[in-house]
Image (cartoon, rainbow, N blue to C red):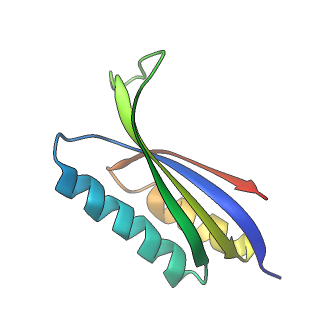
Amino acid sequence: MKRKYEGVYILKLQGQDETIDETVGKIAKELESNGAVLEQVDRIGRKEFTHTNHAKQTHGYYVQYRFEAEPSAIREVESHLKLSDQVMLQHYRRL
């Protein structure tokens, strides 16, 4: 049974907008290839972190996706995106 979800991703900034556009598209394709139906994509933009992480990252680019998917699709997408060098953090919430 499909459910509505919100996924928030923090992307590494490389100083190139093309990299961000490409990564946003790759995440959308990954969701859709696992059966998700995208409803909305919001580019929240660059945000500074209050604390630096182990990789000394001081900021990231936030993107929010709203979609409908099977719960098993979330696990698949999450495991694939963990391997991406461009995705620093991903968080899913059921709506």
Is 52 on the left or on the right of 72, as rendered? left
Quadrant in which the C terminus appears: bottom right
Can you give x and y, in whole percent of width and height, for residue 18 in the image? Answer: 18, 57
Is 25 on the left or on the right of 80, as rendered? left
In the image, residue 65 sits, relative to residue 87, either above or below, namely: below
Can you give x and y, in whole percent of width and height, for residue 60 in the image? Answer: 37, 35
**67 vs 80, nearest the viewer:** 67
Is 51 on the left or on the right of 84, as rendered? right
Quarter where residue 23 is shown: bottom left
In this figure, what is the number of numbered marks? 0
In the image, residue 26 sits, relative to residue 85, either above or below, namely: below
Quarter where residue 55 is shown: top left
Residue at image coords 50%, 62%: 41
Quadrant in which the N terminus appears: bottom right
**75 vs 65, nearest the viewer:** 65
Is 85 on the left or on the right of 6, as rendered? left
Residue at image coords 40%, 56%: 83
Query: Which residue reaches farthest top?
Result: 51
Can you give x and y, in whole percent of width and height, for residue 77 in the image? Answer: 55, 67
Can you give x and y, in whole percent of width and height, for residue 37 in the image? Answer: 61, 80
Quarter where residue 78 is shown: bottom right
In the image, residue 37 sits, relative to residue 57, either above or below, namely: below
Residue at image coords 35%, 68%: 25
Residue at image coords 36%, 69%: 26
